[in-house]
Image: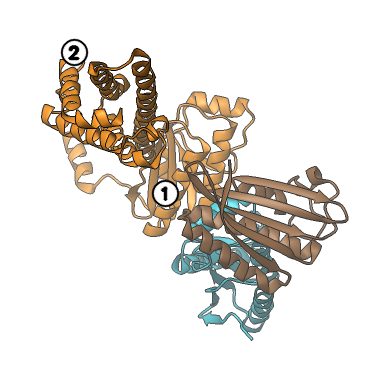
Amino acid sequence: MAHTLNNKKSEILELWMKNQLADSGLRDDLISNKDLRVQSEELVNALITNLNDNNINNSESPDFDKVTELLGGISISRARQGFSPRETGNFILTLKEALLEILRQEPSDVNVLFEESLKLSRLLDNFTILTFETFIKGREEVILRQTDEITDISTPVIKVWDGILAMPIIGTLDSARTQVVMENLLQKIVETGSSIAILDISGVPAVDSLVAQHLLKAVSATRLMGADCIISGIRPEIAQTIVHLGIDLSQIITKASLAGALQYAFKSLRLEVKRSALEVKGITNLQ
Amino acid sequence: MERIPILKLGAFLLVTIQIDLYDRLALDLEEDLVAMVEKTSVKGVLIDISAVGIVDSFMGKILGNIGSMCKLLDAETVVVGMQPAVAITLVELGLPLKGVYTALNVDKGMELLRSKIEIEDIVEADDDDDTSLN
Amino acid sequence: MILPLTKDTIQVYREQDVVPFRGRVKEYAVKIKMGLVGQTKLITAASEIVRNMLKYANGGETTIEIVSRGRDNGIRLTFDDKGPGIADIPLAMKDGFSTGRSLGLGLPGTKRLVSEFDIKSEPGSGTTVTIIMWING
């Protein structure tokens, strides 16, 4: 059988291409027909050249390393380009149909044909599963990368004044996130030599005892390094939860707003913010 | 034998720890430092740990002990330059580092010591009429 | 499934062995590209356990392994001693408990530092502590 298929390589490719192009789900918006042809030809070559009567029952045979590698590459790139799983799966399933069609055209005994079709089906099904697995892995990688990106962007450290850093926290604070928040903040404290850090939690949806514990840890670590940490942005409902849950935050300085925290920071650095003399004069003139 | 050098810097003592402290070395430092505080009668001690990668409970205890001992000799201790990773680890470990002040770097540490000593001077001067500050 | 990839055994019987042992742990942590905070936590945890081992059992044997689980890699440290053992492990794992004159945050504090912590002890024949630190928690 392998021999037959080998002789008909170009026919298989043509038939497969025809099937793919005729498919109503063809995504010519995502991949050009030319690129599709290149991909298809490579795969047919790799499969047919390495296929023999011994390895047809074993999709994991090292003979198929090239096929596996090609399929993996195609799946991952398709996952990234935004193909649906069905579209990606169809790519290899239409190849199966083409192969079976070619086999059917060969004059042979029905039983033999059945046996051969079954073997070929099994092999191609295994490759389909592999395609799905790789496709999902490709998607997972995208998700992982996005998670990392979100963690990175969602914890910016802002230098609001010489010696004062602010860190607005947006979103739920779990222990992994606290770790990142803490590391970023402490690193920035060292870099800038800031003695006051403001953690603003206006963007944190809820504070339970675990979140409070995380906040306390961040404050303790900042203090160990020799800087002070103020928690700001405590909304009234959060103040209520904290008290109802019996969480003790009396060891840390808390302020309702970022402005309040900034004011406190200025005071402890012995800085004053004043309306400029000119403006004061302007106001009196108006009166 | 290896020993950690103690420098006298004006009114303060400065110790810079540059190597991993094994137990003997840490205990020697404690002894040397306390002796030096007594001899020079300084009011402040700075311990720079910016080059220290690991502070475990043993070393934390040594630092705390130094702070308490110096306090008995009327000197304040400031631990300066703790690395972020070390601070996070100590918090997780549950080590509060009692008896010492902390500062970001040597400069800030000196500033802190000066302000502490100033306050003490004021308190001492006002001692007769105002004890509430204590 | 946790697969060990490399294995290294170090004897710790004197106080001077602690610093080289920590150095070796660090080498392996750097090798698998563990983050700085992870490294620091792991080495601090190792240091705590080794000190306990020296104090209560006059030292013992430590094993450093690079292990993998799925896509994640980590360091596994095993501390094996032939000391008196711990009679009541739950009590020893309680914050603030200590039989020696230390701060009493050895075991529970150490547990908080690492991803996985396991302790087995047979009074009279020794204690084995195993900790794992995964790169991605």
**Chain B colour as displayed:** cyan
Q: Which chain is orange?
A: A
Q: In the rendered view, does C59 fall on the left or right side of A12?
A: right
The tag earlier along the polypeptide, 1 or 2, is 2
Q: Which chain is brown?
A: C
In percent of width and height, residue A189 lies at: 42, 55
Residue where numbered disc 2 is placed: A24
On screen, A104 above or below A272?
above
Mark 2 is on which residue type? Ser
Residue C14, disc: none
Q: Nearer the viewer, residue A141 or A258?
A: A141
Give the quadrant of residue C98: bottom right
Give the quadrant of residue A162: bottom left
Give the quadrant of residue A270: bottom left
Q: Residue furthest bottom?
A: B1
Considering the numbered disc 2 on the image, is that residue within a helix, a strand or a loop?
loop
Q: In the rendered view, does A7 fall on the left or right side of B87?
A: left
On screen, B36 above or below A266?
below
